[in-house]
Image: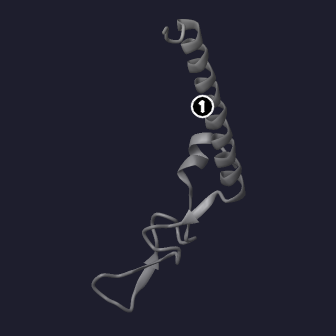
Amino acid sequence: MTGPSILDVLAAIAVCLTALAVLTLALLLAYRVSLKRHPYTDCRRCRGTGERRSRLFAHSFGYCPDCAGSGNKLRAGVRLFNVR
């Protein structure tokens, strides 16, 4: 009994790598479409309210410095893929 030839093994590797590349491109495209449709996320620091409560005085508050009071921040991929 002989095993598969080296050309058969290389062809199988090439098919697997091509399928992996196509799958990766499809996932990147889907992520880019998601970023285009929903570029903002809630600010983690103020939980999307735009306000920050004082630690010392519970009744006072100010605008969140991270999101400038809007409650929204750009998702990380928006800057990475330059999506607007």
Exactly how many numbered labels are in the figure? 1
Residue at the location (57% across, 41% down)?
Answer: 80
Indicate the position of residue 5 as horizontal and vertical percent values: 54, 7
Nearer the observer, 1 or 67:
1
Indicate the position of residue 20 as horizontal and vertical percent values: 59, 31
Is residue 5 placed above or below 64 in the rendered structure? Answer: above
Name the residue that disc number 1 marks.
20
Is residue 78 placed above or below 12 in the rendered structure? Answer: below
Residue at the location (49% across, 8% down)?
Answer: 2
- Visual colour scheme: one colour
59 left or right of 6? left
Indicate the position of residue 53 as horizontal and vertical percent values: 39, 82
28 left or right of 49? right
Question: Tag 1's secondary structure?
Answer: helix
Nearer the observer, 38 or 17:
17
**Could you say which quadrant of the image residue 56 lies in?**
bottom left
Is residue 33 placed above or below 15 in the rendered structure? Answer: below
65 left or right of 24? left
Residue at the location (61% across, 14% down)?
Answer: 11
**Could you say which quadrant of the image residue 7 lies in?**
top right
**Could you say which quadrant of the image residue 65 lies in?**
bottom left
Q: Which residue is situated farthest in the front direction here?
A: 1
Nearer the observer, 39 or 27:
27
Residue type, mark 1 in image: Leu
Neighbour tally class for label 1: few under 14, some 14-19, many 20 plus, Cα within 10 Å? few
Q: Which residue is situated farthest in the left direction here?
A: 56
